[in-house]
Amino acid sequence: MAVFAIPNPKKSLSVDFPIEKVRERVKNISLLNSKYKIQSSNEIFNQYTYESYEFMSLGVYIDINLNSLLPTKTEITVEIRRKLGTFNESHEVTHANNHIVNIINYIAKLTAMHSDDIIKLRSQQTQNINVRLQGSKDKNLAAILAFFLGSLGIHRFYLGQTLIGFLYLIFCWTFIPLCVSIIDFFAFIFMSPNRFNQKYNS
């Protein structure tokens, strides 16, 4: 941990809903804001991690942990982690706190919804994805761009990650983007088509 590192912003609260209902709503946050993409989940321990991209920090992870206090009461804990490094600036903490507020608001909104409304939202998202996939990004092309032009961040521009692409360009003389782009190349090669579409075409 850095000398001046600030602890990861975290907030806990309890809601008067059974954990089963809260769990189902937490898994659908992306329906309200596609900026938040589910990165991993552990159904046994009721742990869910979302990711969100940001400028400079390359984004954050949002850890959501659920704990059943009573049959009709659930504790929700939301913690924000930087993907790279730690929090050491006040504006970074402000952004992290905004994520916490957003996530809690989305969980509250989804929990208040009827199951049929969730199904409608999911159906609308599927239709939107199908429309976008007509001009979707190709996994193999992304891998080729990462291999041949990765040091200039061309593959990131292709994937719509303009800010990250500019970072590759700015630091291309250091050869760091070249090393990272080689990692990107193998990541694309071994990534499943479904995972690629979920991450870059949604």
Image (cartoon, grey):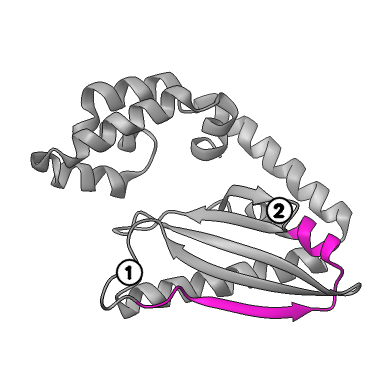
User: Which residue is painted at 27% across and 42% down in the image?
Assistant: 165
Quadrant position of residue 71: bottom right
User: Which residue is painted at 75% across and 63% down in the image?
Assistant: 110
Whether residue 82 is visible to the viewer of this picture, yes or no, is yes
User: Which residue is painted at 73% across and 71% down in the image?
Assistant: 108
Image quarter where the C terminus lies is top right
Left or right, residue 94 beside residue 16: left
Q: Position of residue 87 (x, y in %)?
A: 35, 71
Q: Considering the numbered disc 2 on the image, is that residue within a helix, a strand or a loop?
A: loop
Crowding around mark 2 (Cα neighbors within 10 Å: few <14, some 14 to 19, many 20+) is: some
**Which residue matches tag 1?**
1
**Amino acid under label 2?**
Asn
**Which residue matches tag 2?**
28
Q: Position of residue 84 (x, y in %)?
A: 34, 57
Quadrant position of residue 160: top left
* Magenta residue span: 6-25
Which residue is farthest right? 71
Q: Position of residue 198 (x, y in %)?
A: 57, 37
Left or right, residue 107 beside residue 133: right
Q: Is residue 1 above or below residue 193?
A: below
Q: Considering the numbered disc 1 on the image, is that residue within a helix, a strand or a loop?
A: loop
